[in-house]
């Protein structure tokens, strides 16, 4: 594995008039990583991804793909990068196979080997039966698969997926997960943006959380989860809890039909919680504990960002 | 930096196949519409308008109509393709590929030349067969057909780049292209116009394209064919330069 990162962002800024979509982003994505880019709507994820692929020209800063500048050496970087855009794009004039052949042509790729690769993509993405269908007539899930095939037609080293599973059914989501995992195992660097945080948690080895054009957190998924200062305790009760004492009330995050969920600081011991429950005269049937999920870490970090901004 | 002419060729082929896939709308309909002009205006104005010596009005009219069709169809090809690609989002397929701004421009303009010339040729064949039209200098005919189609393909690209919706493009087509075409001497020799309108016609670049193209048929024209060639090339260079600057900066296409 080389020391050159798959992608390097250096002080990348993008301004649309008075609006700063990216406020000087700097980080690296290592070669072979499965990297998650998370953030609420409008955080700047798509702008950053589009700047990487040349669909947006940054106001300042530099982006490199495997050491090549995306502006000065765009031919090289576009050959190295495949982008699956968020919008479901169609071209009503062409069939799926024609689109893939044309896209191959834009990269100067033709011949028996390329035709075989297009055939393989069609088969692997379960598009063979529909290869002569016009893209304007396809369902959302089919269009998503076509976009993935289009992004892979030139065998890029780095694959960027912008919300690939948005609006697709559970089966297709599972298929896309398996497919991207397989690509990752083959050595591709994968960059994924998603709103499904369980998806990022399951797939990504490293995660960046963006908010308002800035990176709020950047770490391995495990480290982000372990750095979280809270754990969650689900207490099943013999009877419904009407009156809670203040320390319990402060830590309560959810009321369930036969139980309560508390968000407890890691510095607060379990025996302390039990003492509070006893003080509140609650009869405990069961108790279970879990660490925070990526979604909870994400919500905490972004809420923190918002309150700082206010 | 290395070039990607095979990518450019693929984009050119895609653009040709795009208009060919709707050939009735993009080729046959304009031919029929133009022939209707020939039928109506040729018949009504045959004895009303004075043209060149030993040239009938219908014969005079045909090269003008052919050039009008070339101009309008070359413009439509780039402008409609670009605005549709922007609206459907599929322009990003090309923008993600290693095709340079210049190669992008060349591919689109070449396809617009093909469409303009194919439509023009369709009308010309009928003119030659039905109206005994001959060309004295075929080279001038070819030069003006290609250069004018290229200029209009470029202008279409400019309109496609700056338009955000179909409405903008329609405004460009109806308030710029259409008046300039109709006032370019397609239907008359500008010498038949009052002095003011004659002088005004000299500021219309389309006039030089029509006049130079007509010279190829009759070896007679309102202004020198070399002046027409110069103006056409000049406008082609200006339009191409503006396009290349916009494409390189990514104006309205790379956000």
Image: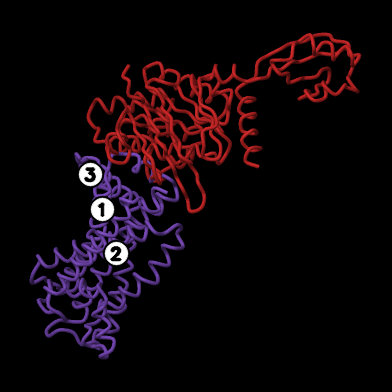
Chain of the residue where label 2 is placed in the rendered structure:
B
Chain holding disc 3 = B
Secondary structure type for disc 2: helix
Camera-nearest label, 2 or 3: 3
The residue tagged 1 is: B111
Quarter of the image that includes the C terminus of chain A: top right
Q: Are the numbered discs 2 and 3 placed on the same chain, yes or no? A: yes
- Please give the count of numbered marks on the rendered protein: 3
Image colour for chain A is: red
Do dots 2 and 1 share one subunit?
yes
Q: Are marks 2 and 3 in contact (CB under 8 Å)?
A: no
Please name the residue that numbered disc 2 is placed on: B31
Dot 1: element: helix
Question: Is A99 drawn above or below residue B39 in the view shown?
Answer: above
Pick out the residue farthest to the bottom: B194
What chain is the purple one? B
Cβ–Cβ under 8 Å for marks 3 and 1: no
The mark found on residue B249 in the picture is none
């Amino acid at each position: 594995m080389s020391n050159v990162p798959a992608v390097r962002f250096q002080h990348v800024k993008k301004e649309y008039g008075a609006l700063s979509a990216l406020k000087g982003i700097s980080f690296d994505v290592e070669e072979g990583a499965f990297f998650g880019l998370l953030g609420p709507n409008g955080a700047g994820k798509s702008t950053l991804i589009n700047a990487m692929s040349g669909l947006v020209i940054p106001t300042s800063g530099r982006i490199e793909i495997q050491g090549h500048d995306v502006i000065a050496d765009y031919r090289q970087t576009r050959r190295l990068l495949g982008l699956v855009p968020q919008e479901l794009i169609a071209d009503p004039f062409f069939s799926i196979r024609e689109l893939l052949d044309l896209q191959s042509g834009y990269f100067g790729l033709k011949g028996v080997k390329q035709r075989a690769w297009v055939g393989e993509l069609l088969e692997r993405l379960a598009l063979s039966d529909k290869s002569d269908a016009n893209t304007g007539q396809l369902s959302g899930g089919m269009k998503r698969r076509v976009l993935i095939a289009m992004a892979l037609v030139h065998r890029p080293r780095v694959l960027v997926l912008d919300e690939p599973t948005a609006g697709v059914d559970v089966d297709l989501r599972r298929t896309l997960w398996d497919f991207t995992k397989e690509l990752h195992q083959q050595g591709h660097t994968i960059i994924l943006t998603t709103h499904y945080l369980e998806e990022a948690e399951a797939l990504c080895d490293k995660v960046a959380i963006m908010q308002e054009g800035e990176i709020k957190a950047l770490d391995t998924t495990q480290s982000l989860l372990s750095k979280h200062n809270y754990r969650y305790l689900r207490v099943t009760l013999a009877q419904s809890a009407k009156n809670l004492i203040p320390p319990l009330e402060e830590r309560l995050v959810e009321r369930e039909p036969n139980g309560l969920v508390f968000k407890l600081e890691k510095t607060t011991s379990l025996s302390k919680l039990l003492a509070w429950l006893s003080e509140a005269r609650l009869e405990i049937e069961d108790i279970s504990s879990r660490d925070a999920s990526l979604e909870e870490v994400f919500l905490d970090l972004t809420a923190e960002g918002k309150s700082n901004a206010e | 930096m290395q070039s990607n002419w095979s990518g450019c060729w693929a984009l050119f082929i895609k653009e040709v196949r795009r208009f060919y896939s709707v050939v009735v709308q993009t080729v046959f309909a304009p031919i029929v519409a133009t022939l209707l002009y020939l039928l109506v205006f040729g018949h009504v104005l045959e004895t009303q308008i004075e043209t060149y010596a030993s040239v009938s009005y219908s014969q005079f009219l045909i090269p003008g109509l052919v050039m009008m069709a070339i101009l309008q169809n070359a413009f439509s090809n780039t402008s409609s393709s670009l605005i549709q690609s922007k609206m459907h989002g599929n322009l990003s397929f090309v923008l993600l590929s290693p095709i340079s701004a210049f190669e992008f421009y060349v591919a689109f303009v070449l396809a617009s030349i093909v469409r303009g010339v194919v439509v023009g040729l369709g009308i010309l064949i009928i003119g030659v067969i039905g109206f005994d039209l001959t060309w004295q200098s075929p080279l001038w005919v070819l030069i003006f057909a290609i250069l004018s189609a290229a200029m209009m393909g470029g202008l279409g690209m400019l309109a496609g780049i700056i338009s955000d919706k179909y409405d903008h493009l329609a405004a460009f087509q109806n308030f710029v292209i259409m008046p300039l075409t109709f006032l370019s001497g397609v239907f008359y020799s500008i010498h038949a116009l009052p002095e003011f309108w004659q002088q005004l016609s000299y500021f219309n670049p389309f006039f030089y394209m029509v006049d130079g193209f007509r010279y190829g048929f009759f070896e007679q024209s309102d202004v020198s064919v070399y002046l027409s060639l110069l103006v056409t090339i000049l406008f082609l260079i200006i339009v191409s330069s503006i396009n290349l600057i916009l494409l390189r900066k990514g104006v309205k296409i790379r956000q």
